[in-house]
Image (cartoon, rainbow, N blue to C red):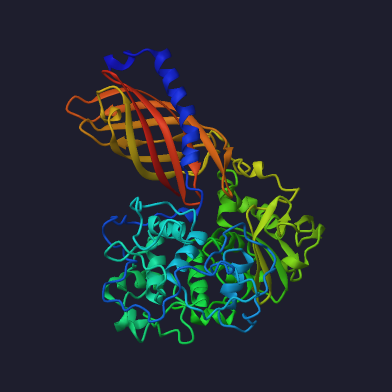
Amino acid sequence: MSSLFRWSSTRVALLVLGMTSAIISPIVISTPASSQNTVPSTTPSPDTPSPATPSLDTPSPTTPSPDTPSPNTPSPATPSLTTPSPTSTVNLSDVSSDYWARPFIQALADNNVIAGFPDGTFRPNQAVTRAEFAALIQKAFGNQNRVRQLNPGGFSDVPANYWAASAIQSAYETGFLAGYPGNVFRPSQEIPRVQGIVALASGLGLTPSSTGTSSDLSTYYNDASSIPNYAVNSVTAATQSSIVVNYPDVKQLNPQQSLTRAEAAALLYQALAKQGRVQPIASNLPATQYIVGGTQRGTDIVSLAASSSSLTTLTSLLKTAGLTDILQQPGPYTVFAPTDEAFAALPAATLQQLQQPENREALIKILRYHVLPGAVTASQFSPGKLATDEGRPVNIKIDRANNQVEVNNARVIQADVKASNGIIHAVNQVLIPPDVNISKLNQPPTGSTNGTPTVGRATRGGRSYIGVGGNIGLGGDDTALSDTNFTVISKLGLTNFLSVRPSVIFGDDTVFLVPVTLDFSPRRAGSVGERTFAISPYIGAGIAIEANADTDIGLLLTGGVDLPLGSKLTLTGGVNAAFMDSTDVGLQLGVGYNF
């Protein structure tokens, strides 16, 4: 204990405060922008074929596509990935309303992911070459993280001026496609269906699951024995993720058959749905019967929302508010459905407070503010006020030049998801009625006081959590705090503004940190892509306990920020200074699971 005061208070306090402010921006900037940046779980070696590389025994199609498309005809596999369009403006003359793949093709075309030919056709049954598939991948997954680099010389059969050279390089470096032995890519070879499936599974980093779904491909495909050995794991993972679409027989994979443009559109759409970037096609459409492993669900608004991986928060809140039965009635209704990311952008602890019994009336008001009477498609909207089920109007704005529809300040990012009792339009922000004060939801329930501790509760800075992370030593040499080590972290809320944050940093001189912190209200830190982030700073003090033969206890100062990544996870970073025999300083970064 005699070492407790062996430090310069002014110098260390300034260091802690300086480091706290310095880490706020890096944490926000380094947060993933969205699910578009999924990194494959394994990084293939540049010299070793990835799972997307066919074996040497893979037969080559007998009719290759020409190496270079006609200068007057754009490559059919060159879509553009832009902001989704809320209205259907693309008319493909050879994709009839009852064509099996129309929902996939039309949705991607409406969202500018794929395009037709100048004559207005799509040519859905035309085979896709490896170069064209690479171009499709580049446009659909252009923001994917690079996991490897192509050799400076590139593939020997892909000249630098080849029309798809950049697309092939991108598809290779993001882990989707690879070449054949001998440093060749075979760009004009028609790509087999199995290669297309494996490419998507590889690029998305999918691995087979042993729980919930079968890993025996014979349960899905009558021709499972014809799947090449190199592709079994990837096809299994893609099947379990509902990416594979088989027409006309859902049980027939035809792995070595050339992939058509219609089939490519279906696979791409399901892959984007897996990432949560598009809504799953409505389960009442005939096309769902060709999705392998898919299950028919209800077709009402609530059932469709429950089947979407990006509307889980909305589904949970509808149940909490007791509105599911109403939205399953004939209606019809039009629902502006905030995505999970939209709810995650709300101030910290708002979601938890909305689910408290005392805030049920406010929750009902907010949810009903997203519902319009009648079924209104995006093309039927007109600028002005529209009455909602909550009784207060929303303001509709139309940007005809960019095919954009806005509701108050929220943008429609996926339009016209048709249900049996209405229409869903996914939006990127939560609509708040003018008579609901969100800030008051973060106050303690009536009758409670901030001075009554409740261990594990949420604070104004966010929910409690437990997690793991790492420590980076910044100074000193007395404890594990001064070195790079593994750490277990936690936050246990006590009152609305106080929490205790026990953590242990493992090392040669393991140290336990037990600070009590003052948690500040969240503040908007900026946006990355479509997502807005809010950070919750904290500062505090406590004790540091060195666990060795001569147990030493010293003063601990701490400061940092919490950054909610959604309803389940919180990213946290902070600077700790412990005053033992020497002053040890470390930067602690981690991710916690909220409870």
Q: Nearer the viewer, residue 321 or 74?
A: 74
Q: Residue at x 42, y 32 (%)?
A: 574
Q: Nearer the viewer, residue 516 or 335?
A: 335
Q: How many marks?
A: 0
Q: Position of residue 545 (x, y in %)?
A: 29, 28
Q: Is residue 433 above or below residue 84?
A: above
Q: Is residue 105 above or below residue 540?
A: below
Q: Is residue 31 above or below residue 392?
A: above
Which residue lies most toward the right here? Answer: 384
Q: Position of residue 179 (x, y in %)?
A: 33, 64
Q: Position of residue 508 (x, y in %)?
A: 20, 32
Drawn side of residue 392 relative to residue 403, left or right: right
Q: Nearer the viewer, residue 432 or 124?
A: 124
Q: Residue at x 37, y 83 (%)?
A: 221
Task: Tell me, yes or no, if residue 552 can be seen here.
Answer: yes
Quadrant where the N terminus lies?
Answer: top left
Q: Position of residue 494 (x, y in %)?
A: 48, 37
Dividing the picture into quadrants, the one containing residue 411 is bottom right
Drawn side of residue 273 relative to residue 586, left or right: right
Q: Residue at x 41, y 36 (%)?
A: 501
Q: Is residue 441 above or below residue 560?
A: below
Task: Tell me, yes or no, if residue 356 can be seen here.
Answer: no
